[in-house]
Image: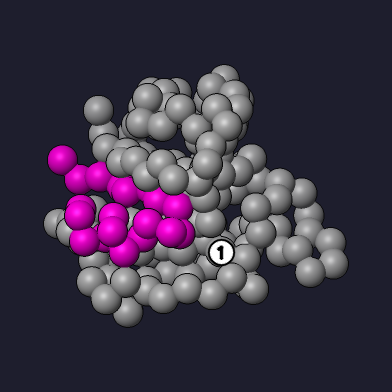
Amino acid sequence: MTRIVVSPLARIAEMAVHHGAREMISLMAKEHSFHRPAVIQADRHLLLHMNDISFAGTGDLVAPQEAHVRAIIDFVSGWDRSAPLLIHCWMGVSRSPAAALIAALAVHPQQDDLVLVHRLRASSPFVTPNARLVAIGDELLGRQGRLVAAVKQIGRGADADGNAPFTLSLAS
């Protein structure tokens, strides 16, 4: 079954090799630099610059925007699904789990939002998907508030140390 691998930045190379990922979405603050793992195809790496905030950015902070979510949806439409998709942010707790939900629904829109979100929670007790990304994804994917409500239902995840990658299957 095709899956999405969600990882903190520190473990992306390990996770890419271990799971055989060839495509990756990075959700990182602009000032954070990193190296794309060699097993990830350069033309199948989407880098989105944003901070992990749930409000309109002020100063140097960049809030998730509609353009970021559209880019995620467009990127996964080209994912061949013969290998897992790797999605990461700094800790793998907020931005990347939100992006994983958006990707999963973009690929399999018939999924029940609540079932998907509970599958996410079962995959990781630490996730607290970024509320702004979730809300924008809900809107752009035409979920009519179901994704937002489902994420609110699972609530905040357990405290995390940023060292807990996990996989999310695309369908139950």
- The amino acid type of the residue labelled 1 equals Met
Q: Which residue occupies the foreground of this view, 77 or 1? A: 1
Residue 46 shows up from this direction: yes
Instruction: Tell me which residue sits at (44%, 45%) in the image.
Output: 163
Segment tinted magenta in the rendering: 1-19
Circle 1 — which element? strand
Q: How is the image coloured?
A: one colour
Q: Which residue occupies the foreground of this view, 118 or 52? A: 52
Above or below: residue 162 compared with residue 69: above
Above or below: residue 80 compared with residue 151: below
**Which quadrant, please, contains the N terminus?**
top left
In the rendered image, residue 121, in percent from the top left (x then y), is placed at 43, 27
The residue wearing badge 1 is 28
Mark 1 closeness class: few <14, some 14–19, many ≥20 residues within 10 Å: many
Q: Is residue 13 left or right of residue 121?
A: left
Q: Is residue 1 left or right of residue 31?
A: left
In the rendered image, residue 106, in percent from the top left (x then y), is placed at 38, 48
Instruction: Tell me which residue sits at (65%, 53%) in the image.
Output: 52
Q: Is residue 93 left or right of residue 35?
A: right
**Which quadrant, please, contains the C terminus?**
top left
Furthest toward the bottom, the residue is 42
Residue 81 shows up from this direction: no
92 part of magenta stretch:
no
Above or below: residue 26 compared with residue 151: below
In the rendered image, residue 146, in percent from the top left (x then y), is placed at 53, 28
Instruction: Tell me which residue sits at (52%, 41%) in the image.
Output: 161
Task: Write down the quadrant of residue 73 in the picture.
Answer: bottom left
18 part of magenta stretch:
yes
